[in-house]
Image (cartoon, grey):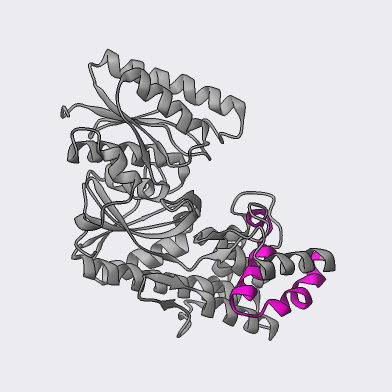
Amino acid sequence: MSVLAACLGVGAWLKNRACLWDGRRARWSALHGDLSEPQACEALERFAEALLAEARAQGLAVAAVAHDLHPDFFSTRLALELAARLGVPAIGVQHHHAHVGVALAEHGVDGPAVGLALDGVGLGHDGQAWGGELLYVGPGRERRLGHLRPLALPGGDRAAREPWRMAAAVLHAAGRGDEIVPRLAPRVGEAAAAGVAQLLARGLHCPPTSSAGRWFDAAAAVLGLCDRQQDEAEAAVALQRAAERHLAAHGATRPLDGGWRIDAAGRLDLLPLLQHLWAAHEAGQPAESGAALFHATLGEALVDWCGDAATRCGVRLAVLSGGCFYNVLLREQVTAGLAARGLKVLWPRDSGPGDAGLALGQAWVARHALAASRDAQGASFLNDDKTTEACPCA
């Protein structure tokens, strides 16, 4: 691959925009919006063509078109069409791998790094909904080192709009499903609470997710801060603001002793923290106090989880990305904690940690995959997740 070869990333489903990356400079499209809107799809197609035309005008070879793993996204179909026309590979890049790649691209670093990618959802290599990921990322390679304990999504996507369902999922995960109706019916109605309890008990329409965003939703609902949200991340924002009010009035909060567990498979379990929040809130603890405790404990857990992984992998670089790191309280605590353990910490300042910057990470991953495998094996190399042998912490 020529040193001036570029890759085109076609971005995420939400807050979509495309990016052409040549290893030195990112050329961005406009922000198109969510691909559920026809006008956003039309804009993506138009701007992708414009970026390709710009590359031709500058004598820049386009070596691949990178896209999300989800086969049904408009962006994926567009990437396949563009790649076929150009005669180059279309490379599927896992959503959270791309999130880590954004920061590495911005800072001009090839890795290796351990990455915390925390957001609402992204399709994983196993076809499940990921969103709380600990990754090892190097040029042309990645490995999932761990993830948040999965929670059930009672009612599927509806659970992302109704945080009280995630509070019910926490009770079910704790073996306390019989408490769902008495605890939640006064807030959401007897029929709704009973219906969700039945879904969870029978395992019907309850796909699992490792999403950090859903753990934030659960905490907000447990503390009575948000049962239903009209806007994206409304529950998480309410939780952060409640924590900020407590910190302004009372100062720093210590993390909960025993508030998390990390098992041998690298799964971070926050269930002890959520059970404590239920009990404390019902005993009269203010929601603001519980929100501050949630942030302090989650932050310390992430430092423990990521810091130990960095030691095992022998790397001194950590990346924080994904929409949850718009949360300043969380980002600053984790940054300080990892720095205290001797790690250099990066996050995508220019593009932002959310989905609007994802195309840069897609292009970064694809470009490195091609550099590592000149004959386009990079596509299967990434999609099959066969990178364990390249990871020193395997």
Question: Does residue 158 lie above or below 252 as drawn?
Answer: above
Kindly identify the residue that appears in the image at 53 percent across and 76 percent down: 271
Q: Which residues are magenta?
A: 159-188
Question: Which of the 4 quarters of the picture holds residue 268?
Answer: bottom left
- Say which of 386 and 255 sits in front: 386
Q: Is residue 240 left or right of residue 281?
A: left
Residue 355: x, y in percent? 46, 43
Q: Is residue 217 magenta?
A: no
- Nearer to the camera, 150 or 163: 150
* Residue 47 on image: x %, y %: 44, 22
Q: Is residue 127 above or below residue 360?
A: below
Question: What residue sits 35% from the left and 44% below the top?
Answer: 383
Q: Position of residue 348 (x, y in %)?
A: 36, 48
Main secondary structure type of the part rendered in magenta: helix
Residue 187 vs residue 1, the one in the foreground: 1
Instruction: Residue 240: tell me if it is visible.
Output: no
Image quarter of residue 311: bottom left
Which image quadrant: the C terminus? bottom left
